[in-house]
Image (cartoon, helix red, strand yellow):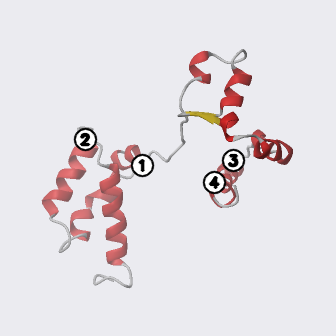
Amino acid sequence: QRLYLADGVLTKVDRASMAHSLEVRSPFLDHQLIEFIARLPKSSLWRGTNTKVILRKMLKKQMPKAIVNRPKKGFGTPVGAYLAGSLSSILASLPEQLEGLIRPELVIRLTSEHISGHRDHRRRLWTLITLAMWYRGPWGPKG
């Protein structure tokens, strides 16, 4: 509550919503609700792999079953889609940027497979982009 929400999710939601003139409220962050939930036994909050037990019971009659029973779903950045689309130009110079560290043919293969949609290499490619940025920085030999 003090770290992940405050310095992470809530900050990002606030910036994104303000950039588009939206007012966003987080209904489950009311301090009285949080204090009440904190006093509940853990068995009321989850059972096995089922999370948000009380909330799901409460919404059972108001929401479709498919929504009430679906697993938790995050909202990550679509890095894979960006790298295959609008940010694909970043990948073009990646083999040269990593010269001496990673075999260029490997980077080219990962890039072409990802952009063509044959494989999802978003994590590897993001790691390589980060490595290239570090390598070109003032601390790396290319800096």
Earlier in the chain: of badge 4 and badge 1, it is: 4
Question: Which numbered tag is attached to residue 117?
Answer: none
Q: Residue at x 60, y 16 (%)?
A: 65
Q: Nearer the viewer, residue 110 or 66?
A: 66
Q: Amino acid at mark 2?
A: Arg
Earlier in the chain: of badge 2 and badge 3, it is: 3
The mark total stands at 4
Q: CA distance from mark 4 to mark 1?
A: 16 Å
To which residue does mark 2 refer? Answer: 119
Q: CA distance from mark 2 to mark 3?
A: 33 Å
Q: Secondary structure at mark 1?
A: helix
Q: Quadrant of the N terminus?
A: bottom right
Left or right of 92? Residue 12 is right
Q: Secondary structure at mark 2?
A: loop
Q: Residue at x 34, y 61 (%)?
A: 127
Could you say where residue 126 lies in the image, as x and y percent from the top left? 36, 57
Q: Amino acid at mark 1?
A: Val
Q: Amino acid at mark 3?
A: Ser
Earlier in the chain: of badge 4 and badge 2, it is: 4
Q: Amino acid at mark 4?
A: Lys
Left or right of 23? Residue 19 is left
To which residue does mark 3 refer? Answer: 17
Q: Secondary structure at mark 4?
A: helix
Could you say where residue 26 lies in the image, as x and y percent from the top left? 75, 43
Question: Which numbered tag is attached to residue 12?
Answer: 4
Q: CA distance from mark 3 to mark 1?
A: 20 Å
Crowding near the residue tagged with mark 2, few <14, some 14–19, many ≥20 C-alpha atoms within 10 Å: few
Question: Which numbered tag is attached to residue 79?
Answer: 1
